[in-house]
Amino acid sequence: MSEQTPAPQRKKRIYSGIQPSGMLTLGNYLGALKNWKNMQEEYDCIYGVMDLHAITVRQEPAKFRQQIYTTCALLLAVGLDPQKSVLMVQSWVPAHAELAWILDCYTQFGELSRMTQFKDKSQKHPENINAGLFTYPALMAADILLYQADLVPVGADQKQHLEITRDIALRMNNLYSGLFTLPEPYIPPAGARVMSLQDPTRKMSKSDENPNAWVALLDKPEDIMRKFKRAVTDSEAKVCVGEGKEGINNLIGIYGAVTGKTAGQVEAEFEGKGYGDFKTAVGEAVVEALRPIREEYDRLINDKGYLLSVYREGSERAARLAARTLSKVQRKLGFVSPEK
């Protein structure tokens, strides 16, 4: 009797998203998006443009609309493949908001009060401390739990959100059994933590008021070069990793991330050379790394019909997956389906 061929093992599912709240940066690319591209080869990936999250801060409608298009185009331009991954827009899948309300009702006030992002954003926008900003973690939990994600890529600033997601899922699983997969943090094998070019003790951020502190993916080559030449360093003038050399450590990390070189190789390449030579080399390497992304973006942003078709199809696929979870949750909680 012939042996049966074993069934192929199910790929683990990854869920991640990015807000269209401003221009994506070199930090977004090296810290997350570059890994998203690599992960789609090995995992079942769902990637979202998180427009609902973005409105906890006031957005100017016309600019916000364009930022959504820009983010959709950039995700494709960095190499995300709609044939390999599900690419969706959060607000196009109503189940995100529906499950978020249910999770709100199973999330404790004290848990939300302890979230550092709520405290930080409340300080930044004291004129607009809205309820959505407070309940933001429940919507983020809904994003993840809707798709029964096994893994969620997280940076240091997102660990608390994944922890509360797991707490909510555990609470509801204990009450109703088997509702949600408990997501685990996914730490990519390689990913640069890119810091501000003007204050290398802080993460590079598109919300930084100093435009010289961050590099946008769509910056012109001459602007990229100018920003790196102005990057904060130290007085030692030696290209090497070291304590108290946050600026140079950051530049070495960036150069290594875009060239594939280790810190040791970077140090050897620039031994005996000054910071001026090194900053120029980093700028040139970044310009070349981003060039194909900018060129593909320019092509895609002029074809909004194609962008809409890609994200409409992806959102429809996401909605089918989300509907299974939402239906199960509603049934176990005792809601009555209109179909019965």
Image (cartoon, grey):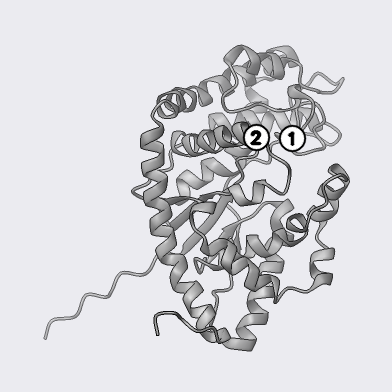
Task: Give the camera-side residue of 335 and 328.
Answer: 335
Task: Give the camera-side residue of 271 and 182.
Answer: 182
Q: Is residue 29 left or right of residue 199?
A: left
| Mark 2: few/some/many CA within 10 Å (<14, 14-19, 20+) | some
Residue matched to label 2: 22
| 185 shown above or below 209 | below
Where disc 1 sits, the SS reads loop
Res. 61 image quadrant:
top right
- Residue drawn at the location 67% of the way across and 20% of the way down: 270
Residue 104 in picture, x, y percent from top left: 69, 70
Q: Is residue 214 left or right of residue 30?
A: right
| Mark 1: few/some/many CA within 10 Å (<14, 14-19, 20+) | few
Residue matched to label 1: 207
- Residue drawn at the location 68% of the way across and 18% of the way down: 278
Task: Give the camera-side residue of 218 and 146.
Answer: 146
Amino acid at circle 2: Gly
Where disc 2 sits, the SS reads loop
Badges 1 and 2: C-beta atoms under 8 Å apart?
yes
- Residue drawn at the location 54% of the way across and 52% of the way down: 91
| 53 shown above or below 244 | below
- Of all residues shown, which one is farthest toward the left? 1
Residue 8 in picture, x, y percent from top left: 30, 69
Task: Give the camera-side residue of 332 and 60.
Answer: 60
Residue 137 in picture, x, y percent from top left: 70, 61
| 159 shown above or below 208 | below
Cα distance between the residues tagged 1 and 2: 8 Å
Count of residue discs: 2
Residue 265: in sight, yes or no? no
Q: Is residue 168 left or right of residue 74?
A: right
